Image: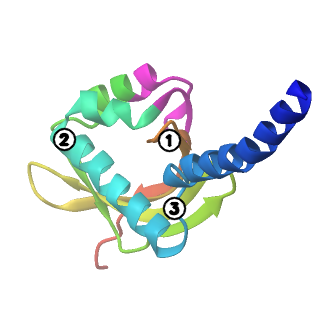
Amino acid sequence: MRNASLARLACLLAPLFVLSTACAQSADAIPTGDALNHTIAALDTKVFDAYNTCDLKTFGGYFSEDVEFYHDTGGLMTSRDAVVDATRRNICHKVRRELVGSLEVYPIKDYGAMEVGSHRFCELDTGKCVGVGKFLNIWRYKDGQWQMTRVISYDHHAIETGK
C-alpha cells in the first residue's frame, strides 16, 4: 500500500517537476529572431564604448578567460588578459572604432550567436578615419551572461583616399 501511494505521488509530482524545469530553462533561454539581433547589437555597442573610452575592466568582461582572438596583423591571443593588454598598448587613446552599419547576427543552437560585420577606425587626434576591417565574433550565453569566446578580426587595410 505504501509503495502504491509513493508511486501515485511520484506520478503527480513528475509533471510539475518537468514543467518547472522547462519554465526555468525558458526564463534564461537564448533569445531568437529580432530579440537576438537587438541583444547582440546592444552588446556590440557596450563592448566598443568600453574599447573607445579605454574602460579596460568593462571591455575585458565581455571576453571569456580563454578567448581565442585571431587578428590578421596582430596574430593569435589566447586569453582575456592578452586581449586587454594588446588593447591597452595599441588602441587606448589612439583610435576609436565605428560600426559601419553592417551588423549581421546568426544564432548558434544551445550556445549563443555569431556576429559578423565591418568597422572602421578613426584617429582620436585628427578625427580622420584611416582604416577598415571585418570581424566575426562568437558569443556564448552561459549563466545569464554573454561573453565572446572566439574573435576573428581580418581584412584590415587603410582607407583609400581620393586619387
Mark sitting on residue 93: none
Colour mapping used in the image? rainbow
> Is residue 34 something that shows in the picture?
yes
Looking at the rendered structure, the secondary structure element under dot 2 is loop
Q: CA distance from mark 3 to mark 1?
A: 16 Å
Q: Residues within 10 Å of mark 3 (few under 14, many from 20)?
A: some
Mark sitting on residue 94: 2
Left-right relation of 131 to 22: left
> Is residue 71 something that shows in the picture?
no
Q: Residue at x 71, y 42 (%)?
A: 13
How far from the left and from the top, in percent, is residue 118? 44, 65
Residue 144 higher or lower than 38, as above or below: above
Q: Which region shows up in magenta?
A: 64-83
Mark 2 belongs to which amino acid?
Lys
Between circles 2 and 3, the one closer to the viewer is: 3
Residue beneath disc 1 = 148
Mark 1 belongs to which amino acid?
Met
Left-right relation of 156 to 59: right
Q: Residue at x 58, y 57 (%)?
A: 114
Looking at the picture, tell me which residue is in the foreground, 52 or 36.
36
Mark sitting on residue 31: 3
